[in-house]
Image (tube, rainbow, N blue to C red):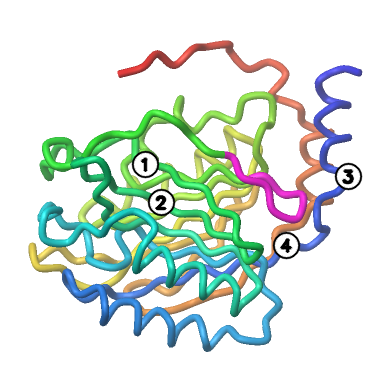
Amino acid sequence: MNELTKSIFMRTEMKPEFKVALIQTDIHWQDVTANLATLEEEIAQLQGQALDLIVLPEMFTTGFTMQAAECAEPANLHTFRWLKLQAERTGAVITGSYVVKENNQFYNRLLWVQPDGQFWQYDKRHLFRMAGEDGVYTAGSQKIIPTWKGWRFLPLICYDLRFPVWSRNVDNEYDCLIYVANWPDVRVVAWDALLQARAIENLAYVLGVNRVGTDANKLWYSGHSAMIEPKGTVHRLPEGKVHSEIFTLEAQKLTAFREKFPAHLDADQFEIKPN
């Protein structure tokens, strides 16, 4: 079985139409209780939509803070339990990142929580040195590629978007790439361009979820959350507004495109060395 045939065969069990909700929200600065209450209301408005996946922004409980000592939670406690509850209520996977303290280290940690109770975690690898994130948080070293209803996902965090090797879809190992972010409007041109590029170069759907509003550092976030199809077609949420939108990922469209245009078979081989 050649690589192309193997790739197609492994997708026969994908749910034909996979429904995702992108939640583009404002974030109350360093107020976990207020943010979880707001998000719970926004998620409740999606009730009855038969969703498969709900995507929240980066640091959705605090905003992009460097005050980790004041904001961090122990792993698998308050916000983790809230995520589990939302997954159970909606029947959908829910994912996003928040500040965690574990073994006396701080992490910008993404949780992927399934309604069946299983979960995966990813610690942000590329820490944004221009804001001092690399001096506060500990970088991760391992990606996760969870599978849900036959679809395989690579969830990453914000600044990871600028590093295409870390996002590379080796042998079509994932079907959809996710970026959760707090990406300010001053750099939104890069956000738009790189999201589209990641979809095209990886022959995959891309989901980018960014926040809106102004944070305590006077940075304005215009959102520009989007779903990008494998050929690069962009579907963007309204700029600067709190807004949730549902998109459908189509298995047949993805598989047919990869069969017709198997560029992954000509990809360069590489190895990522530990930092």
The numbered mark, 2 or 3, whose residue comes first in the sequence reads 3
Marks 1 & 2, CB-CB < 8 Å contact: yes
Residue in view at x 87 percent, y 17 percent: 2
The numbered mark, 3 or 4, whose residue comes first in the sequence reads 3
Residue in view at x 40 percent, y 71 percent: 24
Residue in view at x 38 percent, y 46 percent: 157
Q: Amino acid at mark 1?
A: Asp
Figure quadrant of the N terminus? top right
> Which residue is at the front of the view, 252 or 233?
252
- Crowd band around label 2 with a 10 angstrom C-alpha radius: few (<14), some (14–19), many (20+): many
Q: Which mark is residue 43?
A: none
The residue under label 1 is 123
Whether residue 15 sits left or right of residue 103 in the image: it is: right
For residue 195, say whether it is visible. no
Q: CA distance from mark 3 to mark 1?
A: 31 Å
> Which residue is at the front of the view, 242 or 118?
118
- Crowd band around label 1 with a 10 angstrom C-alpha radius: few (<14), some (14–19), many (20+): many
- Crowd band around label 4 with a 10 angstrom C-alpha radius: few (<14), some (14–19), many (20+): some
Mark 2 or 4, closer to the camera: 2
Q: Amino acid at mark 3?
A: Thr
Q: Which mark is residue 12?
A: 3
The location of residue 117, given as percent across then percent down, is 60, 61
